[in-house]
């Protein structure tokens, strides 16, 4: 059974997920930031190996642990309202698939024990806003490939994809909230 209050906003890198989450937060919704950049900054600070350009398996392990911890923290809050996650546990599974890191049956069970809302919001590649930096090193082609793999991964695990249009952040937030409100009224 999917958790009807926990929504994921996902997509490849540099498509405006974080900006959209900030807008939803500004409008009073609870949001959970992604952990990838925090992990990268922390690993760089301590000269660690858990970086996507060093030890991909360790990096995915750190991301998975952080995603599960965030999920459990939210799920254990006394009054759960709608929550938007900047990426979900399956984003790590997708990363592992892309990097040919084995996914055990135990990990698949872990994923099934941490369900989100069936509708997953995905932001498509948007070249006009895509930028790289010291933490986001993927090429444009890798960003497009990540989007396609992300979409396939969520579909493989039984989620429904809702593509968010390329428009202003306010209109994107309005689109997401309209879908949420229409779905919750059914």
Image (cartoon, rainbow, N blue to C red):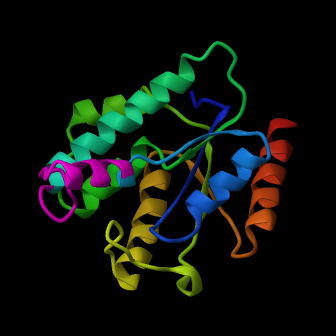
Most foreground residue, 47 or 95 = 47
Q: Quadrant of the C terminus?
A: top right
Residue drawn at 31 percent across, 57 percent down? 95
Is residue 47 in the magenta section? yes
Instruction: Let me know if residue 102 appears in the view.
Output: no
Q: Position of residue 77 (x, y in %)?
A: 59, 17
Residue 140 appears in which quarter of the rendering?
A: bottom left
Residue drawn at 31 percent across, 40 percent down? 64
Q: Position of residue 4 (x, y in %)?
A: 67, 32
In-image side of 86 versus 182 (left or right):
left
Q: Quadrant of the N terminus?
A: top right
Is residue 68 in the magenta section? no
In-image side of 105 versus 76 (left or right):
left
Q: Which residues are magenta?
A: 38-55
Looking at the image, which residue sits at the far bottom?
128
Q: Position of residue 112 (x, y in %)?
A: 42, 31
- The relative height of residue 90 versus residue 126 in the rendered view (above or below) is above
Residue 117 appears in which quarter of the rendering?
A: top right
Residue drawn at 55 percent across, 26 percent down? 74
In-image side of 36 versus 11 (left or right):
left
């Amino acid at each position: 059974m999917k958790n009807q209050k926990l929504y994921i906003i996902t997509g490849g890198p540099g498509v405006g997920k974080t900006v959209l989450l900030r807008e939803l937060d500004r409008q009073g919704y609870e949001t959970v930031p992604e952990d990838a950049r925090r992990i990268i900054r922390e690993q760089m600070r301590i000269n660690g190996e858990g970086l996507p350009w060093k030890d991909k398996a360790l990096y995915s392990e750190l991301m998975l642990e952080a995603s599960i911890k965030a999920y459990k923290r939210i799920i254990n809050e006394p009054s759960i309202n709608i929550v938007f996650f900047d990426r979900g546990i399956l984003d790590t599974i997708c990363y592992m698939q892309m990097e040919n890191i084995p996914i055990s049956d135990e990990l698949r069970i872990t994923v099934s024990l941490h369900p989100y809302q069936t509708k997953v919001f995905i932001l498509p590649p948007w070249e006009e806003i895509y930028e790289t930096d010291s933490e986001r090193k993927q090429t444009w082609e890798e960003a497009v490939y990540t989007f396609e793999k992300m979409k396939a991964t969520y579909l493989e695990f039984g989620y429904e994809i809702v593509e968010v249009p390329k428009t202003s952040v306010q209109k994107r937030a309005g689109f997401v909230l309209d879908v949420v409100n229409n779905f919750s009224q059914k």
